[in-house]
Image (spheres, coloured by chain):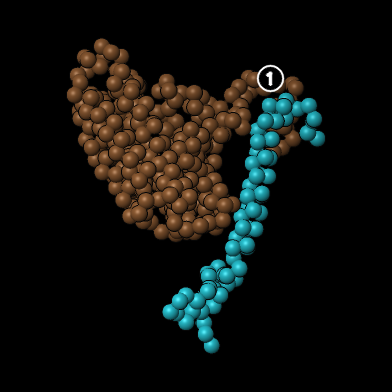
Amino acid sequence: MAIREQSDMHKRRLSRNIGVGLSLVAFCVIVFGMTVAKIREGSKMEAFDHQPRVSMTPAQEGQSGGTQQ
Amino acid sequence: MSDASIDITTKSAKPAELEPKEASFGDYVLLLKPRVMSLVVFTAFVGIVAAPVAQPLFISFCAILFIAIGAGASGALNMWYDADIDRVMKRTASRPVPSGRVTAQEAFQIGLALSVMSVVFLGLATNWVAAGLLAFTIFFYVVIYTIWLKRATPQNIVIGGAAGAFPPMVGWAAVTGDVSLASMLMFGLIFMWTPPHFWALALFMKSDYHKADVPMLTVTHGRAATRRHIWIYTVLLAPVALGIGVTQIGGPLYMAAAVVLNLIFLKGAWDIRARSEDAAEADGYATEKKFFRFSLYYLFLHFCAILGDIALRAAGLSLGGW
């Protein structure tokens, strides 16, 4: 049996469904934004362990810095 | 869900009788204690801004959001466990669980799901030190405070205060990845402030905690002892508040504000300590009410002063030595 459009349950739960829907959309936006932000700041990171790559960090004064080969 | 179960709630049945207290989305929001969340958001924000390392703005936003969700989740778990107490007390009887709009099982499931989600996503967004601290905060509030000590000791307010004190520390850790003296003192400020704040309220609010068998200091040790406790905790609070002024997040503005605010707070606590119950009843607990109102400004202004000094430093207006 198909769910009727005029179901009372649908009417009663409209606000709840809209709220849950908006929360899920907001969650997706946040995860996407987080991904973008992490990738932007992640240029100095190795992919395998998400740690700063020493060879890409600028050398400080008095230090040889990075991996000099 | 079967078709039959859908049909049962349609025209033929009377929904108002079948499910008289169906929850709206707002009821689920109330489950997260949004008023408590606002304090969490503000203090976590200060913890993040005060940290000496820059962080992408969106990551900071996410950190505050997940800390707030973690706090809300612990609120939902608190409502799940305390439904029996909340049902008895007037102040809490209209909450979603005791009023029957949300079932205790739903509160438990939502609380648990949001707890895991907030900790995992805080870890992914920032670092696992902050995530660990958030997990500990939730554990502390739900297990140590709500389940274990709230019904066992009149010092429950003191212990519960620790859970509310963690957010600036979590915020700081979200940026720096560690714990420092400054972040511990921000924790200490809220932790030491909580008992005098709540006990002042307990003195003039004739609450029905005794009906729910929750030991409150005013009932177990008497009102004179509560007045002494307010004074002692306020005296212990002052050095913590002033101590922030000599750390890296303090400055001249903070120090000036802390001195003034603590002098006023100490004066209020002494006035409460010095007066009798008869005198308090005669003027409708005016001193206690004034002290309670000021305690709200006290905490808010301390954290505002921290932000003020950050702004001064950013503008290049800080004094030497700070």
What kind of element bears circle 1? loop
Q: Position of residue B171 (x, y in %)?
A: 46, 50
Q: Position of residue B198 (x, y in %)?
A: 33, 30
Q: Nearer the viewer, residue B208 or B61?
A: B61
Q: Which residue is rendered at x = 72% and y = 27% of the image?
A: A11
Chain identifier matching the cyan colour in the rendered picture: A
Q: Where B15 falls versus B119 (above or below)?
A: above
Whether residue B99 sits left or right of residue B270 in the image: it is: right
Q: Which residue is rendered at x = 33% and y = 47% of the image?
A: B245
Q: Position of residue B157 (x, y in %)?
A: 32, 35
Q: Which residue is mark 1?
A: B14
Q: Nearer the viewer, residue B102 or B257?
A: B257
Q: Nearer the viewer, residue B35 or A5?
A: B35
Q: Which residue is rendered at x = 63% and y = 23% of the image?
A: B18
Chain identifier matching the brown colour in the rendered picture: B
Q: Mark 1 is on which residue type?
A: Lys
